[in-house]
Image: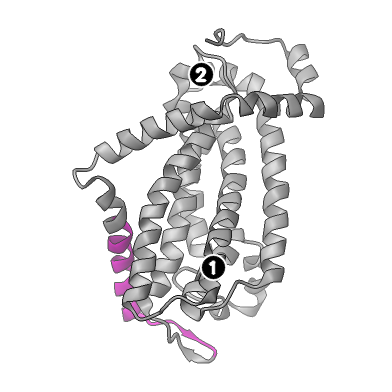
Amino acid sequence: MDAPLRIISVEEARRRQTFGHFVGYLAWLWKHLRLVETLSRTELKRTVAKSKLYYLWWMFDPLLDTACYAFLFLMFRPRTGTGEIDAPILIFLLAGIIPFRWTSSCCAAAAATWKRYANIIQQVRFPYLVLPGATFRTEGWLYLCALGVLLCATLAYGLWPTAAWLTLPLWLALHGLVTLALMLPIAVLSAFSSDFTRVVPYGLRLMFFATPILYTGDQLPVWARPVANLNPLAHVVNGYRAILLDGVAPDPVSATVLLAVSLVGLAAGAFWFVRSEPFIARSITRTTY
């Protein structure tokens, strides 16, 4: 068993903030991948046990959420420059809400990481990157349940699989990279400020409305479209809709740019996380959540 966490000096922490230490940290993390599975399985059982419907709730939940927005959608039916949206409204909304909920749930859980695992952190020494990894894995399993609902609804509407569906696993993996790249900075910032943790839900709500979930990109004002293109979740949602609604593969240029940005963001976030780790345990003891 690893020794209890040792509070290190600032000088020693700075010596660890090098690229060589980062590589060594990744090797240390590799040895603890089993811990990711263990924590994820425990958290998954705890989360699912809270509902008497078990995994069925994560299938019904997005449908209920979508039904609420579908009512507003029908009351104020959006139009594009070429007329009304001709895709089934339910699939249009599900293809935006379900992917966004995965990212939103992961980011919210990342903000609550230190509160959830504070006792473990103060007693056991292990790479803290295990914690967001376990959260990502837990939310990923629940997302697969919701994604199954989306696929079944798509088939029920008569939108049969095309060759573009073969790209869905790749798009799902790319979506996962985007989500991880967003989770790590949120986890770091929430470790040092309980106020930031309280702000995260509002930021996620703002991102929901800034993502073309209830509307299409064509409905945005011309001046807002370049800004909207900076939102990675906008490209994620458009990719799912391209595959499921239009039966075409996502734009390869957009996918390549999104992949490059996600990898750079993930690497930068992981490096920042590792550099901050020596100070996190000390901060948690002083932070009141």
Q: Residue at x 39, y 67 (%)?
A: 151
Q: Is residue 90 visible?
A: no
Residue 216 in the image, given as x and y percentages of width and height: 51, 76
Q: Main secondary structure of the magenta part?
A: helix
Q: Is residue 284 magenta?
A: no
**Looking at the image, which is closer to me, 284 or 126?**
126
| Of pointers 2 and 1, the one earlier in the residue sequence | 2
Residue 169 in the image, given as x and y percentages of width and height: 53, 60
Q: Is residue 155 left or right of residue 35?
A: left
Residue 44 in the image, given as x and y percentages of width and height: 36, 37
Query: Of helix, strand and loop, which one carries label 2?
Result: helix
Q: Residue at x 34, y 68 (%)?
A: 152
**Amino acid at pointer 1:** Leu
Task: Give the answer, above or below, for where 33 lies relative to 285.
Answer: below
**Looking at the image, which is closer to me, 126 or 289?**
126
Q: Is residue 170 left or right of residue 63?
A: right
**Amino acid at pointer 2:** Ile
Instruction: Give the residue number, with chain letter if any, for mark 1.
Output: 166
Query: Of helix, strand and loop, which one carries label 1?
Result: helix
Instruction: Give the residue number, with chain letter if any, for mark 2.
Output: 121
Asked which colour scheme the image uses, the reply is one colour
Q: Is residue 263 left or right of residue 176?
A: right
Q: Which mark is residue 246?
A: none
Q: Which residues are magenta?
A: 61-81
For the residues labelled 2 and 1, the Cα–Cα distance comes to 41 Å
